Structure formats: structure tokens, C-alpha cells
Image (cartoon, helix red, strand yellow):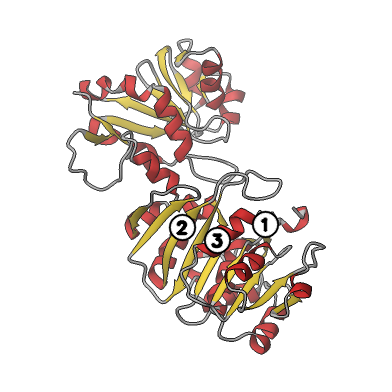
Amino acid sequence: MIPELGQYFTLDPSSALLARSLTTRNPKKFVDLGCGDGALASAMLDRWPKAKGICLDISHQDGFNLNKKFSNINYSLVDILTPDFDKFFSSDVSDVDVIVSNPPFIKRSVDGYISDVFQSVGLHDVVDVMAPRYSTHYAFLAQSLRLVKDHGEIAIILPESFVSGDKYRNARSALFERYNLVKVLELSPGSFIKTEAKCYILYLKTGGPTESVMLKAANTPDSYEVSVRDGINRLDYKYYRNQSSGLCFSYKESKNNTLQSLEDLGFEVLRGNRTGKQVRLSGVSYCHTDTINEAEKKHSKMIRFKAFGPKINDSFGKEVIVKPGDIVISRVGSRVVGKIALVTEGEAILTDCVFRLRPTNDLAKAHVPILLSDDTASFLKEIARGTCARYLTFDDIRKLKIHRVV
């Protein structure tokens, strides 16, 4: 990795998988945006030795020597997120059949040029160009869409946040409307040198809209075809794999009457509205992610609070309170997300890092043991969104479907 550039170099198996999964037949010309040490370009040449390759990067890597080994490789240094790229784009590139890219996962300052790039591919309305900084991987995607020919193919490695994060819901929707997102391939952990970050390969073609998306994972034979409606919510293979286990199913109506969402079973789902800092400084009893984590360390899923006095009402106005019978779930935090416990004594203020599930009828109460199982905690951790700061959304909990027990 080059820390200042946010570059994580692709290992050969992942590069080969990316090239092997392209559907384009016999491309004459491909471009590797942000080529690094040339792993993706090498995989492309292994599959199509006669293809002409154009490899671009912002700085030279010592491991790159493909242009010395192959006469059909053109290697150039250029920052593709500046007007210099347009000079290269207009003079040296045409009829690009395939673009491959493993972009850096960093942020750069927004400027007029990059705003125009987003505008040119119809993604200006889903990117806050007024913000001081933007994600470079999204700009690499926009540049790829500008560069590839009509009905050409793009294979780009993107972080998990783009595939399942709430922040990118509008981006996914825009891609579906304007382009054909054919497939999302989930890479195995360890696919990049010196990082365990979870990443995915998106395969897109110009010309749309998208009708459905195939989701696959490396080294697995099964796949899932998801609708645009489901794909806007999330596109990670692991989520749909876990759905098939029987704990959680699609948000669509199920023909199996034994499956119901927590909301339909009678659970009221709320999120706390006070920060951890606020409640710690107040001195009142509170339920935060560390509260649930401490219970687990004691090999218990039970939490007991001291009964609160007038101080809690003196300190806050409209707070969310947990009381005996409530289930609490850690909403955010890579090490604690999805951890779950039952309040058995006392009352406390809920922080904004925790969800409260309150059974409102006997049917919901009958399902409390299922929710407190280790399987549920494992499932919630597995479907958590985000690359580094893992989190669950309100709908992830509210629409969670489980087998009805009565």
C-alpha cells in the first residue's frame, strides 16, 4: 500500500477473477485506471494477449514492467482527476472496449473539474459537489463511464460502503436508471495487500437501465439475482446469503406465512436520541454500546439498571427510555455492532448508538428468545453495513424477518 495515495494493491487471484468474469468477447483495447504495479493489466493480457492495453497512474510503481515485457502496453503517468486527463483522453484514447480499475479509497478536495465530470455522466445529482471533499473511488467510476465506448464494459473495485451503505443509496439508484449494472462480485477477505477491507467488483455496461443484478462471491458456486428495488437497498452477496439461512428474508411479501418482520410481529423499534457524551456527563443511568458489551463479557445477555430518580427527568426532555422487557441492540461500532441483550431490571436512557426493541403484544414476547440467540447476533453482525465504521440501519432491524414460532 502507498498510504498517502490510499492504494491497496490487488493480489493475482483477485486480478485473475476480475478478468475472467468479464463478459466482453475479444476486446481490442482496454484501459487500467490507477494501474499500480500492473496486476489487473497483467490478468487482462493473460486472457487476451493481443489486446492493446493503456495503463494510467498518478505515480510510477517499481513493480510495473509490463510496458517492457509487452509491445502492446502503453504506460503513462497522469492524474485522472485533473484536466490533464482530458488532454490524454482526447488525443490518445478511442474505442475503449473495457475499463478495469482498483481506485484509491481516499478523499480529495472538490473542484470545478470534478464537478463537471459528475455532470457529464449524469451523476451530479447524487454527489454533493458543494462539499469540501469527495470520494475518489466514485470519481474513478465517473471517469470510467466517460471513457468507455457505447455498450462497453467496466469492472471496478469498490469498497463495501458503496455496495451497501445508506450514503450511496442515491448513487445506486442513479446507476440503475442510467446504466446497466450487470453483476456485483464479492471478494474474499485478504484480496489486497496489507488490508482486510471488504471490497466488491462492480461490472457495468453503458446503456441502461438496469433490470436486475446478479450477486456472487469469490469461490462460491451459488448466486442471487436481485431486483432494482432490493439492489437500491443493498447489493452485498453476504446479506442475501444470510437471508437464505431462514433467519431473515427479502423485504418482499413471502409466500411462507411462518415468516414475519419484527414490526409485523409487534415489536416497536426506536433509536436513542442522546449521545454517549451527553448521558455520561449527566450522571444518570444510561444504555450505550459499552453497556451491552460489558454484559457479554460476563457471558450474559441480561442487563440490570438501578431505578432512576427525578434527576433523569431534570436532565433531559424527550428521551428514549429502556425498561424491563426491552431488547437492546448495538447499532454501530466494528467490534460491538449487532450485540444484543435484554433489560431485566431498572430503567435507563438509551443513547443514539443503540436500538430498542419493545414487544407490544404476546406474539412479540414469544419471539424474544429467538432474538436473544447467538445466531441472531451473528446474523446482525454479518449484515452490518460500512467498511470501517460498521453500522445497522433502522430498516435493517424493523424489517428483519424471522420464523414465527406460534
Inter-mark Cα distance, 1 to 3: 22 Å
Return the disc, 2 or 3, that comes first in the chain's sequence.
3
Find disc 1 in the rendering and name its residue: 106
Kind of residue at disc 1: Ile
Proximity of marks 2 and 3: CB atoms separated by less than 8 Å = no
On the picture, is 31 further left or further right than 164?
right
Find disc 3 in the rendering and name its residue: 18
Res 320 visible: no
| Picture coordinates of residue 283, whole percent (x, y) | 58, 19
Proximity of marks 1 and 3: CB atoms separated by less than 8 Å = no
Kind of residue at disc 2: Val
Q: Secondary structure at mark 2?
A: strand
Return the disc, 2 or 1, that comes first in the chain's sequence.
1
Q: Nearer the viewer, mark 1 or mark 3?
A: 3
Return the disc, 1 or 3, that comes first in the chain's sequence.
3
Please name the residue shown 41% across and 49% down the image.
221
Residue neighbourhood size for the residue with mark 3, other residues' Cα within 10 Å, grouped as few (<14), some (14–19), many (≥20):
many
Q: Nearer the viewer, mark 2 or mark 1?
A: 2
Kind of residue at disc 3: Leu
Inter-mark Cα distance, 2 to 1: 22 Å
Q: Secondary structure at mark 3?
A: helix
| Picture coordinates of residue 299, whole percent (x, y) | 51, 13
